[in-house]
Every structure is written in C-alpha cells, then in structure tokens.
Image (cartoon, rainbow, N blue to C red):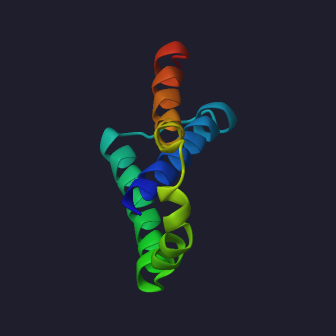
Amino acid sequence: MYLLALSAGGWLLFLQQLFLRYVRIAWFSSQAGAMINALTIYAGITFIFYRVFIQHEKDQKIYNKYFNAWNENPNKRRDLLLTSFVAAVPYVLMICVKILLPR
C-alpha cells in the first residue's frame, strides 16, 4: 500500500512539474515551499490509500482474490520488474526534465 502511494505520489508530482514548467511557467519561490507541497501530496495519497485499502479491508479482498494466481504465475520476476519500472519512471523523468531542460 505504501509503495503504491509512493508511486502515485511520484506520478502526481511529475504531472505537477510539467504543469508548472510548461503551462504556468512558474516555480516554487522557496525550496521549503516545494518540500511542504511534496510532503502534502505524499501524505494525502497515503491517507486516502490507508482509508480505502486498510480501513475498508480492500487489500485483503484483493490479496485473497489473486493469491493463488500469483503463486502459480511463472512470470513473477518479470511482473515485479515491470511494477518497479512503473513506480520509478516518474522520478527518472523528473530528473531528466530538471537536467536536460533547464529553465
């Protein structure tokens, strides 16, 4: 659940970076303001996922539904790498935009 929140937060921050850089052509005035914004996004996403998955026990329903299919899946390693790639892509793209496309 927390890795999913980290991935979703990364995608939201990447979309925000694109919006601020190319649509509004503005940026945060201070590093502290940017950090508070990022922490707010991560905390909000984590709170929403905690409420949906943990408190309403959706995670157990999903786990029970796909447990046998995961154990019988011959492509576990590939699926894990694909999931890790999707989670890491927004952070890599943010770094690339920062380095390759300076303001």
Give x and y (percent) for residue 77: 46, 39
Q: Position of residue 75 (x, y in %)?
A: 54, 41
Residue 53 position, x and y percent, is 47, 75
Q: Residue at x 45, y 25 (%)?
A: 95
**What is the quadrant of residue 39 in the picture?**
bottom left
Q: Nearer the viewer, residue 28 or 101?
A: 101
* Vertical position of residue 29 compared to residue 67: above or below: above
Count of number-bearing discs = 0
6, above or below 46, in the image: above
Task: Give the residue furthest to the right.
Answer: 23
Q: The N terminus lies in which quarter of the figure?
A: bottom left
Quadrant for residue 41, please give it.
bottom left
Residue at 46% in and 36% down: 88
Q: Is 101 displayed left or right of 1 in the figure?
A: right
Q: Residue at x 42, y 52 (%)?
A: 6
- Front-most of residues 20 and 1: 1
* Residue at (46% x, 63% y) in the render: 45
Please say if 87 is above or below 1: above
Extreme-top residue of the structure: 100
Q: Residue furthest left?
A: 32
Please tell me which residue lies in front, 61 or 44: 61
Q: Position of residue 37 (x, y in %)?
A: 41, 53
